[in-house]
Structure formats: C-alpha cells, structure tokens
C-alpha cells in the first residue's frame, strides 16, 4: 500500500483554506493508503509562537483534524516534536541541501518579508525539515495545497543528492497530490493572496471555529467587484475575488465552479454571499460540535496522540537509524 504523509502547523486555528486545500482531502486516503498525518509544531516555531498558545493550538489542531474525519485508528496521527526521528534526519538534510536551492524558495521570501536578516534560520531551513518529515517514513505521496509544490521539488532534490552522494538507492521519489477545485483558497480581503491562519487580519479568513455571526460578517465584508456574477467560468478570469468565492461554494457543495455559475450567474454579490454564508455555516457546524466534544476531554486526546507517536516512531526510527549508518555515524 502506498504511504502518504502530510502535516499542518499549529500556528493558529485551521482555516477554510487548510480544510479545503488539505485536511478534507486527507480523509479518504485513510481508506486507500497507509496514511500518516502530523501536527508540525517544529515548523510552527520557525516564526514566534507564544508557548502557552502553542500547546493549546497543538491540541486544537489535533481535535480539528479528528473532527474533520481523521480517525486515529485508521491513520497515524501524532505531534511532530514527539518523534525525534524528524530532527535527526533534518540535520543530515541541512548538510545535504545546498544554499542555492533554499535561496529559491518563495515561501521563505513571502514569510520573511522585507527584513530577511531578522528571519529565523529555522524559517530558512524549513523545507529541509519538511523533506525529513516525509522521508523519515519513505512516504511517496504527499497531499498538499499547490503552494507547497516547490518544497516537494526540493525534497526530491535532497533525496536524489543523498542517494547519489552515498551511492545508494535509499530514498524514493515523492509525488505531490494536489486535489480538489479549491486547491488554493484566497484571502477574503485580497483575491491574489492565499488565505492564511496567521494573516494579521482575522477578516481575511474563515476559521473552522467561526460561528454563524462571524461567518456572515466576514462573507458580507469580503472584497468583491461591482459586476454581477458571470454566466461562464471564463468570465471569472480577471476577477480573483469573484473566482475565489465561487470556488469556495463549489468546493463546499462538492461541485464545480461551472455548476455554481449555472445556478447563480447573473446574480449580484449580495444574494450570492447569503447563499455562500448559509452553505458554510451548515458545512462547518458538525465539525465544530465534534471539535468541542474532543477538546472537552484533553486526556483522551493526548492519549490518542501518544499512541500515534509510538506508531510513527516504530516506522521512522529504523529508517533514520539506517540513514545514520549510511552517513557513517558510529553506532551507540
Ligand atoms: N489558502 C490555502 N488554500 C489551500 N490550501 C492551503 N493550505 C494552507 N493554506 C491554504 C494547505 O494547508 C496545509 C497545511 O498548511 P500549514 O499549516 O502547514 O502551512 P501553510 O501552508 O503556511 O498554511 P497557513 O494557513 O498559511 O499557515 P501559516 O499562516 O502559519 O503560514 C498545506 O498542505 C497547505 O498547502
């Protein structure tokens, strides 16, 4: 059975972007693949995280994943810092990846902003840790939003260079799995930027925990243009905000943008936004109920994560031990 790996940072409450671009697509893979999912707290601290908040957000993220349909009995679900194989392999990959490769990573440029000198070195080597996350399990398929494709190409460069340098055929090739009509959900305030859980403006995103009033307000205030919705998808081309809202309704309703436009083309945004809001509220309500139930019993949640970490370790430890042997580290 092909092994899939994916992770999500506990850097805030998961957004609709995380849900439609990633989490929701992880659920069916539990049935068809050997699926490993991880709350990547080591990645989260590449930008400042308040320590108390980080612990809370890590639990919340785990609860959100389970509430969205990940079943810790049908997949391996754990917290990244609980499995040391990730950092052991990441250090080796820091020594394999070339600076020139990392210099090309657009996410670093986006996240570091203008003052690159002030960014953490962890943010710079983030893609090396991501490569380690995947390759510590020799996973070959990684479901991600399309914003992560560049990091996966780098992971393959690292795997190939490792194999070449040590004269082995050890690490497999990794393929990205980009799924769904809303592979990239954009900010509600700017249709050219992706929706992010750490965006300074809460109005830019729908959080999975937003209630009816919050969703209604955010959708009502979402940036649009003055034209009514087009009848055809090609009419969305130069209209990023309209395309985003149509894409969201299509994804939430399990249909395609053309079908959304068949039903709502010609409508003004006022009426369309009401439909979108009600669809979002109805879709998110059961997830929110389940999340609240899980967070009501943190001991049970922690126990599930502990078990997940043990199962993850059982796979990753022998793989990373073999890497250390190939590198020439003296056995203990
Ligand atoms: N807007 C998005 N549309 C589609 N997919 C998205 N993903 C993130 N934002 C969108 C996908 O979610 C998965 C987990 O992402 P992550 O938490 O590891 O990091 P990220 O991509 O940096 O997500 P955020 O929400 O933007 O977090 P912050 O604000 O902390 O940087 C990935 O598969 C990603 O593609």
Image (cartoon, helix red, strand yellow):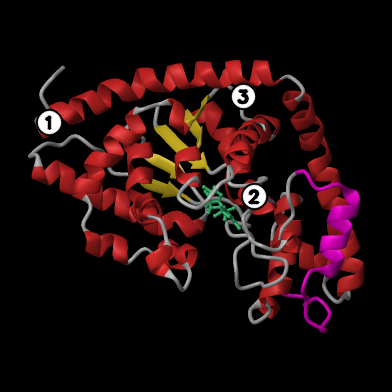
Measured along the vertical axis of the image, is residue 166 above or below residue 317?
below
Q: Is residue 319 left or right of residue 285?
A: left
- Does the magenta portion include 217? yes
Secondary structure of the residue carrying tag 3 is loop
Secondary structure of the residue carrying tag 2 is helix
Q: Where residue 184 is drawn, which disc sits there?
A: none
**Residue 163 shows up from this direction:** yes
**Residue 319: percent from left, percent from top:** 26, 26
Which residue is label 2 attached to? 20
Mark 2 or 1: the one toward you: 1
Give 30 or 56, whichever is nearer the viewer.
Answer: 56
Asked if marks 2 and 1 touch (Cβ < 8 Å), the reply is no
Q: Is residue 225 left or right of residue 299?
A: right
Q: Residue at x 38, y 21 (%)?
A: 313
* Residue range of the region highlighted in magenta in the rendering: 209-232
Measured along the vertical axis of the image, is residue 160 above or below residue 134?
below
Asked if the residue at label 2 sits under 8 Å from ligand 1, the reply is yes
Within 10 Å of disc 2 (Cα), the crowding (few <14, some 14-19, many 20+) is many
Which residue is label 3 attached to? 71
Q: Residue at x 77, y 74 (%)?
A: 223
Measured in 3D between alpha carbons, the distance from the residue under mark 2 to the one under mark 1, in whole angstroms, is 40 Å
**Residue 86: percent from left, percent from top:** 35, 34
Quarter-wise, where is residue 283 in the image? Answer: top right
Within 10 Å of disc 3 (Cα), the crowding (few <14, some 14-19, many 20+) is some
Measured along the vertical axis of the image, is residue 233 above or below residue 111?
below
Measured in 3D between alpha carbons, the distance from the residue under mark 1 to the one under mark 3, in whole angstroms, is 35 Å
Across the whole image, how many numbered discs are drawn on residues? 3
Q: Which of pointers 2 and 3 lies earlier in the amino acid sequence? A: 2
Which residue is label 1 attached to? 326
- Does the magenta portion include 306? no
């Amino acid at each position: 059975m092909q092994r899939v790996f994916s992770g999500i940072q506990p850097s805030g409450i998961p957004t609709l972007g995380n849900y439609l671009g990633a989490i929701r697509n992880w659920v069916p893979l539990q049935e068809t693949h050997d699926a490993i999912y991880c709350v990547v707290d080591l990645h989260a601290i590449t930008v400042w995280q308040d320590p108390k908040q980080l612990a809370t957000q890590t639990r919340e993220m785990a609860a959100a994943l389970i509430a969205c349909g990940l079943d810790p009995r049908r997949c391996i679900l754990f917290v990244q810092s609980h499995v040391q194989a990730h950092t052991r392999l990441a250090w080796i990959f820091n020594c394999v990846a070339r600076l020139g490769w990392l210099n090309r990573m657009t996410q670093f440029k986006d996240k570091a902003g203008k003052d690159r000198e002030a960014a953490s070195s962890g943010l710079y080597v983030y893609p090396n840790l991501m490569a380690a996350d995947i390759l510590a399990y020799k996973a070959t398929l990684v479901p991600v939003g399309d914003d992560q494709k560049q990091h996966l190409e780098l992971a393959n460069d690292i795997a190939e260079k490792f194999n070449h340098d040590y004269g082995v055929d050890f690490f497999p090739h990794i393929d990205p799995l980009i799924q769904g009509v809303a592979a990239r959900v954009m900010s509600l305030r700017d249709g050219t930027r992706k929706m992010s859980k750490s965006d300074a403006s809460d109005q830019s995103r729908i959080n999975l925990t937003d209630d009816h009033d919050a969703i209604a307000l955010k959708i009502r205030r979402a940036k649009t243009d003055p034209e009514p919705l087009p009848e055809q998808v090609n009419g969305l081309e130069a209209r990023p905000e309209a395309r985003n809202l149509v894409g969201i309704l299509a994804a939430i309703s399990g249909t395609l943008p053309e079908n959304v436009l068949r039903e709502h083309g010609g409508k003004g945004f006022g009426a369309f936004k009401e439909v979108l809001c009600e669809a979002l509220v109805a879709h998110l309500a059961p997830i929110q109920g389940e999340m609240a139930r899980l967070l009501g019993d943190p001991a049970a949640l922690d126990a599930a994560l502990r078990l997940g970490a043990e199962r993850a370790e059982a796979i990753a430890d022998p793989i990373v031990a073999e890497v250390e042997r190939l590198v020439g580290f003296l056995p203990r």
